[in-house]
Structure formats: structure tokens, C-alpha cells
Amino acid sequence: MFRFHLQSVLQHRRRRCEACERVVGRATAELVAAQAELQRLQEEHTAAEQTLVHCLAGGTVMRNVQLHQTYREALDGRIAAQHRRLAECEERLAAARQAYLQAETARQALETLYERRWRAYRREQRRAEQLGFDERAMRDVARRLSRDRGTSGGSA
């Protein structure tokens, strides 16, 4: 019966890879969400600028122009914060990918060792089986020879 002495380590490394995959997935989802939010804020900023231009061109009351300007400046701050959040997400994703690559490399090394040991075990099994066949064949030949000698030696 084949037994890989590092099976528990291999299973641990497989679980580690799966966990790292989940982390990469979450980090990717966070990045996509951060990108979508940035896009939304930029569109909102563009709309606010257009509204401000229309207010200035249309002779809107200065108080309303100041409110639109304040709102646009607030959006600028939110966009800057979103850029920072996006950079953090990219860093987390890069770190998660790096951790996954390390876990995958460690897992593959053990998988390769497992495969080598399995092939060696199978070779040994086939060799032992062939030896068994050879021994049976030799016994059969020896039996036939002794029977043939007994038969030919008794009649002469």
C-alpha cells in the first residue's frame, strides 16, 4: 500500500493555496469595486463642473455658485481619497498574488515529489509482480523437467 510520508504537509499546502486563491479573489473584487467607485466619483465631478459652468454662464446667484464650487471641491477630496484607496487595493492584490505564487510553488514542489514517489512505488510493484510471475514460471519449468526425467528415466 502506497503511503506518502509528507501527505499531511501536502494537504496543508493545498489548503494554503486554496486560501490564497480566496484572498486574491477578495482583493480583486475590492479593486474592481474601488475602480467603479472612482469612475462614479469622476463622472459626478464632471457633472458638477458642467453645472458650475452653466451657473456661471447663466448669471446664477453667487451663493449658488459658491455652493456648487464647495461641492466640487468636496468631490475633489473624495476623488483623492478614492485614489489612495485604489492604490491600497492594488498593493493588497499584489501582496496576495505574491503569497499565492509562493504557496503554489511550495505545493508544486511537494506534488512533484509525490508523483516521483508514486511512480517509484508503481515500478517496484510491477517489478515484484514480474518476479512473482518469473518464480512461478521457473517452478513450472522445474516441475516439467523433473517429471520428464522421471518418465524418461523409468522406461529405459
Image (spheres, grey):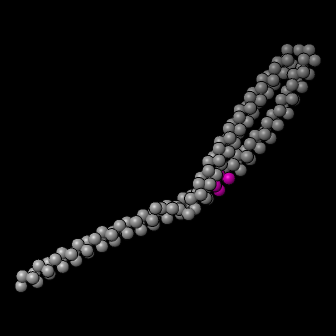
Instruction: Give the side of residue 72 with respect to residue 139, left or right.
Output: right
Q: Is residue 36 magenta?
A: no
Seen in the image, is 85 located left or right of residue 110? right
Residue 106: x, y in percent? 61, 59
Furthest toward the left, the residue is 156
Position of the C terminus by quadrant:
bottom left
Give the residue at x 28% y 71%: 136
As for residue 100 lying within the magenta part, the answer is yes
Position above or below: 31 against 13: above
* Rendered location of residue 104, percent (x, y): 61, 54
Residue at the spot 78% in from the left edge and 39% down from the top edge: 85
Q: What percent of the width, then of the height, locates residue 20?
A: 65, 48
* Residue 35 seen anywhere in this rendered image of the structure: no
Left or right: residue 152 compared with residue 112: left
| Quadrant in the rendering for residue 155 | bottom left
143 versus 55 height, above or below: below
Location of residue 49 (image quadrant) = top right
Q: Closest to the observer: 34 or 146? A: 146
Residue at 75% in and 33% down: 38
| Whether residue 153 is situated above or below residue 23 in the rendered picture | below
Q: Which residues are magenta?
A: 99-104
From the top left corner, tell me how far across and down residue 31 is, in percent.
Answer: 71, 39
Question: Could you tell me which residue is drawn at 81 percent across and 23 percent down?
Answer: 48
- The residue closer to the viewer here, 102 or 47, is 102
